[in-house]
Amino acid sequence: MGSGTASGSGSAIVLALDTPDLAEARALAAATSGSVGLVKVGLELFGAHGPDAVRTLRADGHRVMLDLKLHDIPATVGRAVAALVPLGAELLTVHAGGGTAMLTAAVQAAKAAGPGPGGPGPGGPGPGPRIAAVTVLTSLGPDDLAALGAGDATRAATRLTRLALEAGCQALVCSPLEVARLRALTGPDVTIICPGVRPAAPQPDSDDQARVATPAAALAAGADLLVVGRPITRAPDPAAAAATIAAETQTAGAAR
């Protein structure tokens, strides 16, 4: 497959390429490129193809969010971030639950590694990745959080956000249901990324996301970027599905 068109930089949509098949990921990214701002490389695609998944999508012209949710001792995470910087991803996720020292190590490693090949154009100059701290996974419902001793999702996300801000993280990942509270803490300079975004409420037992909202609701609450996967990638026509969601986000964004 040849090079795709560069992802639409003005779109709030991050397309989750949750597949181990790199050819499928490239095809989905190319088909939706006019409606999508970034593509997300997560554990499935990275586990199957490693750094080549990011390199290939970058070479195709796509902006990349690398969603590995790093969570380990500070030294290990710092070295991992330094190793990942040259891939050119614009966002790199770490678990806020790793604590302030781990988050600080990630931020410092991204800065110390210097500018990577990230940025709006394929291979063009730009800063290293922004470190995005994952607060509370959107798959966790009240019973899960109680079992973990985390309590209420909003309170847990608030505590973790304070750690991330103290460490200098430039972005946060949270469910749409917590974004308004976290935006009040961060102000306008931190990028808030929301997975768990669905154009319509999922049917019972058809989804593993517990805390969800529509794209319009997430943006109205203060989100900057919306991670959308299955509503696009499993649609009969992914390009049309992406265009419909993009139109909704543009309308919602204009109303803010």
Image: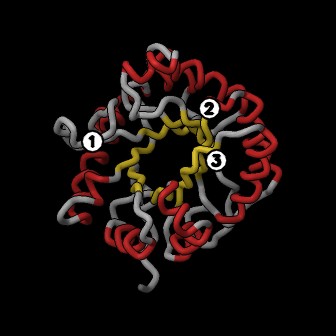
| Mark 3 vs mark 2, CA separation in Å | 14 Å
From this view, report whether residue 228 is shown above or below residue 146.
below
**Is 214 placed left or right of 76 in the picture?**
left
**Is 78 placed left or right of 88 in the picture?**
right
- Expressed as whole percent of the image width and height from the top left, the position of residue 104 reads 76, 35
Q: Residue 130 carries which label?
A: 3
Q: Residue 96 carries which label?
A: 2
Q: Is residue 124 visible?
A: yes
Q: How crowded is mark 3: few (under 14 residues within 10 Å), some or many (20 or more)?
A: many
From this view, report whether residue 157 is shown above or below residue 26.
above
**In front: mark 3 or mark 2?**
2
- Expressed as whole percent of the image width and height from the top left, the position of residue 26 reads 42, 73
**In front: mark 2 or mark 1?**
1
Tell which circle, 2 or 1, labels the residue nearer the N-terminal end: 2
- Expressed as whole percent of the image width and height from the top left, the position of residue 184 reads 50, 21
Which residue is at a point 62% across and 67% down the rendered structure image? 51
Q: Nearer the viewer, residue 238 or 153?
A: 153
Which residue is at a point 59% across and 72% down the rendered structure image? 52
Residue most extreme to the front: 147
